[in-house]
Image (spheres, coloured by chain):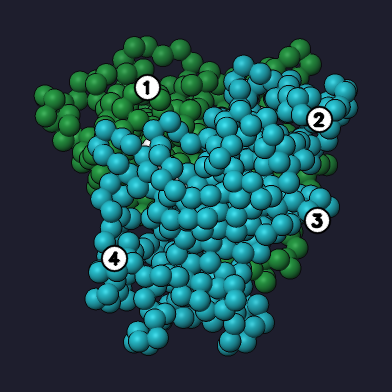
Chain colours: A green, B cyan
Amino acid sequence: MALLKVINLRQHFKISRSFTVKAVNGVTFEINAGETYGLVGESGSGKTTIGRSIIRLYNPTEGKVFFDGKKISGNLDAATNKMLRQNMQMIFQDPMSSLNPRKKVGDIIAEGLDIHKLYKNLKERQEIIAEILKKVGLSPAHAERYPQQFSGGQRQRVGIARALVMNPKLIIADECISALDVSIQAQVVNLMKDIQDETKCAYLFIAHDLSMVKYISDRIGVLHKGYLVETGTTQEIFSNPAHPYTQSLLSAVPQPNPRVEKNRTLLTYNAENVNYESCTMQQLSDTHFVLT
Amino acid sequence: MSIKNLDITFKTNAGNIHAIRGVNFDLPRGKTVALVGESGSGKSVTMKAVTGLLDSNCIINSGNIFYNGVDLLTLSKKDLRQKINGQQIAMVFQDPMTSLDPTMTIGAQIMEGMLLHQKISKSDAEKKALELLNLVGIIDAEKRMKNYPHQLSGGMRQRVVIAIALSCEAKVLICDEPTTALDVTIQAKILNLIKDIQAQMGLSVIYITHDLGVVAKVADFVNVMYAGKIIETGTVDEIFYDPRHPYTWGLLSAMPDLETDDARLYSIPGSPPNLLHEPTGDAFAARNQFAMKIDEKAAPPMFQITETHFAATWLLHPDAPKIELPPELKARLERSRKAAFLGDKA
Ligand SMILES: Nc1ncnc2c1ncn2[C@@H]1O[C@H](COP(=O)(O)OP(=O)(O)OP(=O)(O)O)[C@@H](O)[C@H]1O
Ligand SMILES: Nc1ncnc2c1ncn2[C@@H]1O[C@H](COP(=O)(O)OP(=O)(O)OP(=O)(O)O)[C@@H](O)[C@H]1O
Ligand SMILES: [Mg+2]
Ligand SMILES: [Mg+2]
């Protein structure tokens, strides 16, 4: 059974009488327990909004979301709300604005533990914090520092530690490695994989960097202008991309080679005249779908 | 601009952190210099020193930052703010939310600097703000001017910050990870935009990023930073086709390229030194498979390879043994030279 089911999700924001942003438009996908689903797409395509709607930071305009068999869209009772807050965690895109500058990092990480009283005594609390800091490549002494005393990449790892410490069933990781340098990206990706092996948690891995998505995801969804234009296994998306937008994304990955990079022209995809609303999902294989 | 022997310490509860340990760095007029290096190596702190925005718990032990002959470190905060920042030097910060005001529309924020520093009417400022938003690829720019930062996506915010930096028509642009939240197509658009402006106005650019693909695209020169020091510097060709420092080798190897399939990701073993305790010898020694006895005792000086290429590793000492590069790296360098039609020699 799927751990998360998103059915026909729409999320619109009314900015003024004449201007509504249609951020997410009828998106449907599932994530199985223990699986990693990569969500990629251009800036503003609705990736963060999908994450925030699932975890109920927004109220979906339309559509249904099921988690572990329970409906989590619409009105929630207290028990479902509690279940959600323990079992689903989000790592936020903007590390600085999601970490309280007046709190020590150790207390930030332990927030969820404190709310749900997930330790026996203060000694255990301290041990849990130390353990998770080491896991994300920081040191236990960092617990005493404040967020602004960290570099951008170190802060990002604090956000990761805060999510991991809850042992959730689903982690929504929004661009959680893009602020990290390549070597630490590799460490974090490897770490997330190890933790998944250990705890069987699932990830919704939101990113724009295709080369990293490839290493971590089992399946991938490609988002464009709030529509899911293609979804398939990682293998299918990379070796057999069907949608022109997916193809243009794949062609634009920069190569670490100055002479090649400086002479390259990019394949661009012009979607101005495409009306996705009138398109339908076509099935190419058991797992591969494309919007045409 | 030229940074000489910059040395910075932070005071914290746990003790003093020696974050910047003698950084030298030149930005030639009209060129793009990239600053790369591991998280925590001191890239942002170095650039904050340039703009006088260091946190209050820092001590500048020594150093100069010359800009047009003036040492910026001797200027008062007020002079920096009124004469330099936003007029001569513009900076795009790593975390866009921290440089945007959540209570102001983005239109007002883009126009603010122009109205303050340039003799320009409100309607001209508005026109220019719109044009800039279009240039950084924001669709419906006119409507977006009225949005507040939280109503934009992460990448849109990042682009607004870039638009603000470009609006000041500064002579030096410092970009700290400006495109990390952007997908490859928009990233390419912005990099090209900065290049165009550079060609038109002779702008000099410092580019901090961990994305070596971006470095390859934009940089003329590259500085590689490790544990508060520049450990290799050279032209972009020298760094990518003929790197000499083992840390630079590690960085290049860690970049996944779409061709090398399905191997587990390479990451440089170990972790960076804790700068609460001053490292003795070469700070990279513990993670360096080619480390020699001397690496534990003395920090290597910068050895010169060409007129523009320097690296701080004892491997370049005339008495050091000749070493074989790891086979994967060797293959990779050969591949990339071949793709660049450079033959076997860089
Ligand atoms: N206000 C502060 N107090 C104490 N330590 C600090 C402070 N600001 C930065 N540091 C430390 O200085 C070092 C260098 O930080 P810096 O932000 O320059 O790293 P960076 O190279 O920009 O890394 P990243 O790629 O992660 O952004 C880090 O170890 C960081 O923890
Ligand atoms: N709270 C909000 N109020 C109004 N509009 C919003 C809000 N949140 C997001 N939007 C709009 O929804 C659209 C999708 O934004 P979202 O943050 O989901 O994009 P994204 O795919 O995560 O992009 P990025 O890669 O740049 O982070 C954008 O047009 C954005 O302006
Ligand atoms: Mg986002
Ligand atoms: Mg930084």
Residue annotated with mark 3: B199
Is residue B226 or residue A44 the one in the foreground? B226
Q: Earlier in the sequence, mark 4 or mark 2?
A: 2
In the rendered view, would you say A102 is above or below B30? above
Residue annotated with mark 2: B118
Q: Secondary structure at mark 2?
A: loop
What is the x, y in percent for residue B107?
74, 24
Closer to viewer: mark 4 or mark 3:
4
Ligand 1 within 8 Å of the CB at mark 1: no
Side of B200 relative to B282 (left or right): right
Ligand 2 within 8 Å of the CB at mark 2: no
Q: Are marks 4 and 2 on the same chain?
A: yes
Residue annotated with mark 4: B281
Q: Are marks 2 and 1 on the same chain?
A: no
Q: CA distance from mark 1 to mark 4?
A: 37 Å
Q: Earlier in the sequence, mark 3 or mark 2?
A: 2
Q: At 80% from the left edge and 56% from the top edge, which residue is drawn?
A: B199
Q: Chain of mark 2?
A: B
Mark 4, other Cα within 10 Å: few <14 / some 14–19 / many ≥20: some
What is the x, y in percent for residue B44?
50, 45
Q: CA distance from mark 3 to mark 2?
A: 22 Å
**Amino acid carrying mark 2 in the image:** Gln
Q: CA distance from mark 4 to mark 3?
A: 43 Å
Q: At 77% from the left edge and 40% from the top edge, which residue is drawn?
A: B169
Is residue A255 or residue A10 the one in the foreground? A255
Mark 1, other Cα within 10 Å: few <14 / some 14–19 / many ≥20: few
